[in-house]
Amino acid sequence: MESFIHLRKGKTPRRVHADLDGLKDDELGRGGFTGRTANMYRRHDPTAYRAVGPLRPVDVLADQLKPSDATDANGGPLLMFSNADCRVLLSRRGEAMPYYARHVDGDLLCFVHSGGGLLETEFGPLRYRPGDWIYVPKACTWRQVPDAETTMLMIEATDEFRVPPPGTLGRHFPFDPSQAVIPDPDPIDEDGRDQYDVRLIHEGGPTTLYYQHNPLDVEGWRGDNFAFSFNISDYNVVTSDSVHLPPTVHLFMQATGVYVMNFLPKPAEGTPGTERTPWYHRNVDYDEIAFFHGGSLYGIPMPPGLISHAPQGVHHGAPEKARERARRKFDDYTRVDWQVIAIDTRRRLTPSPEILANDLGQH
């Protein structure tokens, strides 16, 4: 039963996620760290298992995956994970799209891992660079023109993405929406081609519409439904000196059943005895995807482009050796320099065959 009072049974530390004295901190929680919780203090590492069957963690490297747009300008992104609420894709486009795209099953949220270029949209052009989030509303027509090969993590939600409601910290945390880049209209003239192809991306598709004029011909717009970009360097990280905060405080945008978070450089917890590494958990109500953008964790480089999927109900977390090192190096580091993009989904995600074929744990 949910209560203001939390029970204690057996041997437990006085502070949460601190002063473990050799025990292993394992959280069994509901509602993605916001519901009822039980912190179990174990003798052994709960991630020290061998999984057989479909419900197991998966790790892949983005540069080992082969989206068709990496080698064919007419190609598209690679489907990595999906459920009824969203699809998670990877793009590695090096050439301008000869067609225009329109995702008609849901909003599109893209994270730029590497590369730079231009996204032409009906609302106007958006320049992009590494660390940018790009939001494209459902059924908005757009076209990508890279300056250099661009690796993008793409999340298509069947419901609309929304900025999380302001909490007790106010409207500028975790980020200030006035830092978003909003395009100005810039209609594009015809370039002499006979027709302009608009590819409708949808379940059971695609469908192609053929126009005799450039579809990005908008002279002006008004309203509160528009494309924009936002760079993670402008994200306001919420921190604590005495406890490692749960992932939910780093929420960026959300749709029904889909939550997107930024784990970014921040001051490390400074109160002695505090665990600086996220505790073991099995997040029983959410699948988790972590996309490693870059950085390091207490001097150990994080593999850029690593994509890690942890299904709900299955233990995951940094191995005990990494935790022991973080404790041993407590006085050597005052910051956490990681850059990780996280996606939590309420429904179970199904990995695509390409993801399973490239799973590092199976090779």
Image: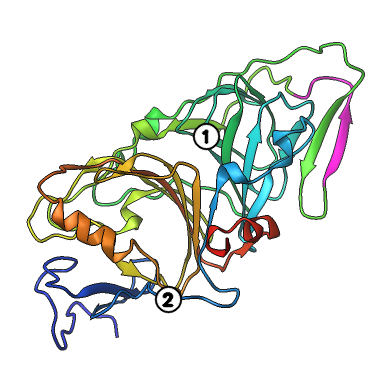
Residue 313 image offset from top left, x and y in percent: 45, 75
Residue picked out by circle 2: 49
Residue occupying image coordinates x 88% and y 16%: 193
The foreground one among 361 and 249 is: 361
The x and y percentages for residue 359 are: 58, 59
Rendered view: 10 above or below 156: below
Of the two numbered discs 1 and 2 in the rendering, the one whose residue sits closer to the viewer:
2
Whether the magenta-drawn stretch holds residue 207 is answered as: yes
Q: Which amino acid type is shown beneath numbered disc 2?
A: Tyr
- Disc number for residue 112: 1
Q: Is 272 a magenta residue?
A: no
**Foreground pick, 115 / 140:** 115
Examine the image and state in which quarter residue 109 appears: top right
Scheme of image coloration? rainbow
- The answer to whether any part of residue 150 appears in the image is yes
The quarter of the image holding the N terminus is: bottom left
Q: Quadrant of residue 96?
A: top right
Magenta-colored span: 206-215
- Residue 34 can be seen, yes or no: no
Residue drawn 7% across the image and 57% down it: 272
Name the element at disc 1. strand
Mark 1 → mark 2, Cα distance in angstroms? 34 Å
Quadrant that contains the C terminus: bottom right
Q: Nearer the viewer, residue 19 or 193?
A: 19
User: In this rendering, is residue 183 above or below 51?
Assistant: above
Residue, far right: 194
Image location of residue 160, percent across then percent down: 57, 49
Q: Is residue 202 left or right of residue 196?
A: left
